[in-house]
Image (cartoon, rainbow, N blue to C red):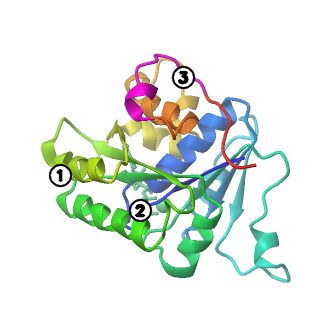
Amino acid sequence: MQTILVLNSKGGCGKTTLATNLASLFAAGGQKTVLMDYDPQGSCLRWRSLRSEDLPAIQVIDATRPPHGLTRTWQLSVPPQTERLIIDAPAGVSGGTLQEMLRRTDIIVIPVVPSPLDIHATSDFIRHLLLVGKVRKLGIHLGVVANRVRRHTPLYEPLQRFLVTVDIPFLTSLSDSDYYIRAAERGQGIFELSDDEALVEREQWLPLVRWLACPEEPLRQVAGTPQLTVVSGGRT
Ligand SMILES: Nc1ncnc2c1ncn2[C@@H]1O[C@H](COP(=O)(O)OP(=O)(O)OP(=O)(O)O)[C@@H](O)[C@H]1O
Ligand SMILES: [Mg+2]
């Protein structure tokens, strides 16, 4: 099973959007996929409630409610044969909850919107993950995704320079697009819209999807293959 944690301390940067789109992409590819919702707002649960039963199944586990009569381990256990576990983190997560998520994570995807404050805070958060979260020692791969980008912007350059120094890939830029909102309203991801919709947006996911298949490889070797293949991997 591969566990992907979508994480940033900043709110509203697209964690739930990335988590639900990843889950629907893997489920559409025939993989047994589970979403774990750590957000007290229950955004993934709400998204799941809008999803048609005709679409590929995605189980959502609510990690926020007290585990009435259950142990925490039992509450957070995923069904056997799960191939992908996607964890949607809440904004501002830290301390024991962050450690609990990190302990089971293979890959962290960090969305960041084009705002100077968010970009600065994201660099600080990545330092925190490296120094306090000890993600390298845990064998966790990190990657960053620009989200809600409207046009080419030099705003990300300081973050990109910082990422080079800590050897973390800047994976792709996702447009600010109504297709994400349209898909979310139906409990879908953009890959489940009709074939002629969101073509540019889907293309922008390719570097991220390829990297998730081989996160240990340098990005320049992973990028450039014009095919969307979803490969299982990670801890078993
Ligand atoms: N690429 C995008 N294009 C258009 N809208 C987007 C995009 N990404 C996210 N949004 C919208 O931005 C808002 C915030 O996104 P989302 O809920 O995914 O962020 P979040 O990081 O999960 O927020 P929170 O910290 O509150 O959990 C939502 O209304 C979502 O539909
Ligand atoms: Mg969210």
In percent of width and height, residue 88 lies at 55, 59
Question: Disc 2 or 3, which lies upstream in sequence?
Answer: 2
Out of 106 and 115, give the one closest to the viewer. Answer: 106
| Contact check, label 2 and label 3, Cβ < 8 Å | no
Is the magenta region chiefly helix, strand or loop?
A: loop
Residue drawn at point x = 53 percent, y = 18 percent: 195
Q: Is residue 89 left or right of residue 157?
A: right
The image shows residue 33, relative to residue 214, as above or below, that is below
Q: Secondary structure at mark 3?
A: loop
Q: Which residues are magenta?
A: 218-229
Residue drawn at point x = 73 percent, y = 36 percent: 31
Q: Is residue 170 left or right of residue 216?
A: left
Question: Disc 2 or 1, which lies upstream in sequence?
Answer: 2
Q: Secondary structure at mark 2?
A: loop
Q: Callout 3, which amino acid?
A: Leu
Out of 34 and 198, give the one closest to the viewer. Answer: 34
The count of marks equals 3
Q: Is residue 226 magenta?
A: yes
Q: Is residue 153 left or right of residue 185?
A: left
Q: Which mark is residue 8?
A: 2
Q: Secondary structure at mark 1?
A: helix
Question: Spatial distance from mark 3 to mark 1, Cα to Cα?
Answer: 30 Å
Q: Is mark 2 within 8 Å of ligand 1?
A: yes
Question: Disc 3 or 1, which lies upstream in sequence?
Answer: 1
Q: Residues within 10 Å of mark 2 (few under 14, many from 20)?
A: many
Q: Which mark is residue 228?
A: 3
Q: Residues within 10 Å of mark 1 (few under 14, many from 20)?
A: few
Residue 118 appears in view: yes
Question: Spatial distance from mark 2 to mark 1, Cα to Cα?
Answer: 18 Å
In percent of width and height, residue 149 lies at 27, 42
Q: Quadrant of residue 37?
A: bottom right
Label 1: which residue?
158
